[in-house]
Amino acid sequence: MKFATKISFCFLLCLFFLFSCKDKKQPENTLTSGIIEIACAENFQNIIASEVEVFSVHNPEAFVFPRYTSEDNAIKMLIDDSVRLAIVSRDLNAAEKAKFPKNRIIRKYIFAFEGIAIIANKSNRDTLFSISELTKILKGETVTWKQLNPDSPLDTIRVFFNNNESSVLRYVVDSLTSGTKKISKYLYATNNTEELFEKIAKTPNAIAVVGLNQLGNETSKNYEQAAQKVRFVWISKEEKATGQNSFLPYAGDLNKEQYPLWRPIYVLLAETREGLPKGFCFFLTQEVGQKVVLKAGLMPITDAQNTWTQWGEK
């Protein structure tokens, strides 16, 4: 994934230099032209790569180069004025706001809502969880599959996250476990999303917590490869999960408030003039950018439609 990102960046950079040489000047920095680098939490790489691609088609004189990094570092880059736009899943905390220069204005915009997916090994048939059961697993109160299903042949429940700096891990700690420090000792961090899918595919007793965007949209190669290795866990708000009251992390179920695990995706904009950062932010929140959000299986800030997944078996 990182290698492909470097190739894409080099390709776009070459295009920019060719453009510059041809016209002997860089494109003017406007809402629809210029060159900028933006910071993006690496969990959102799939959606932002798609948005940048479509934005470039509509604005051929605009060159947007995403830098995919940890969420904390993306915000640090914004504070240090290395970038004027960051894509993250949270607002600045009190310490970060204190570091932000008082003479600079930062605006926060929601441009999508992402379902948080629970995935399991293909062979595991226990794929209906209530939100309370999931919370007990993450807190370490439920540690074996037999505690959930006495007939299960599996033993310890192992839980994987993408990495220790993952914004998904922060979401789980802050939201599901109410910020408690009591977390299961069977939580494991992987180096990247590909490794996480491999771990789940090879570990029948494991589950993983991932942002839906990490799977890619339903027509992508990444999605097809992941679907061959893992399956969704259906989640219920009720105390006892059934096939009728459990749902998946897609836009339709988020829009109907049936799926309980989701988070907003923010654009943090530290730019007041009518430049390209503001133009890209505007694009993300308007019709074309919102269509990209919906196609990715995320819920747009406009009306969402029901989406279907080939993983939809209970």
Image (cartoon, rainbow, N blue to C red):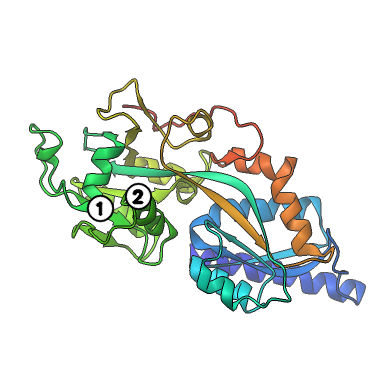
- Vertical placement of 57 versus 275: above or below? above
Q: The residue tagged with tag 1: helix, strand or loop? A: strand
Residue at position x 46%, y 45% from top? 212
Instruction: Measuring from the top left, give residue 267's x and y in whole percent.
Output: 64, 57
Instruction: Measuring from the top left, give residue 67's x and y in whole percent.
Output: 59, 68
Residue at position x 41%, y 62% from top? 166
Give the numbered dot on residue 204.
none
- Vertical placement of 142 versus 192: above or below? above
Mark 2: amino acid? Val
Q: Nearer the viewer, residue 60 or 260?
A: 260
Instruction: Measuring from the top left, give residue 42's x and y in whole percent.
Output: 50, 62
Q: Which residue is mark 2?
A: 209
Instruction: Measuring from the top left, give residue 297's x and y in whole percent.
Output: 53, 39
Give the numbered dot on residue 159.
1
Residue at position x 50%, y 34% from top? 254
300 to the left or right of 247 = right
Give the CA separation, mark 1 to mark 2: 7 Å
- Vertical placement of 11 versus 263: above or below? below
198 to the left or right of 53 = left
310 to the left or right of 156 = right
Q: Counting other residues with Cα less than 10 Å from the Cα at mark 1, is it few (<14), some (14-19), or many (20 or more)?
A: many
- Mark 1 vs 2: CB contact within 8 A: yes
Mark 1: amino acid? Val
Quarter occupied by residue 132: top left
Q: Nearer the viewer, residue 141 or 30?
A: 141
- Sequence-wise, the earlier of marks 1 and 2 is 1
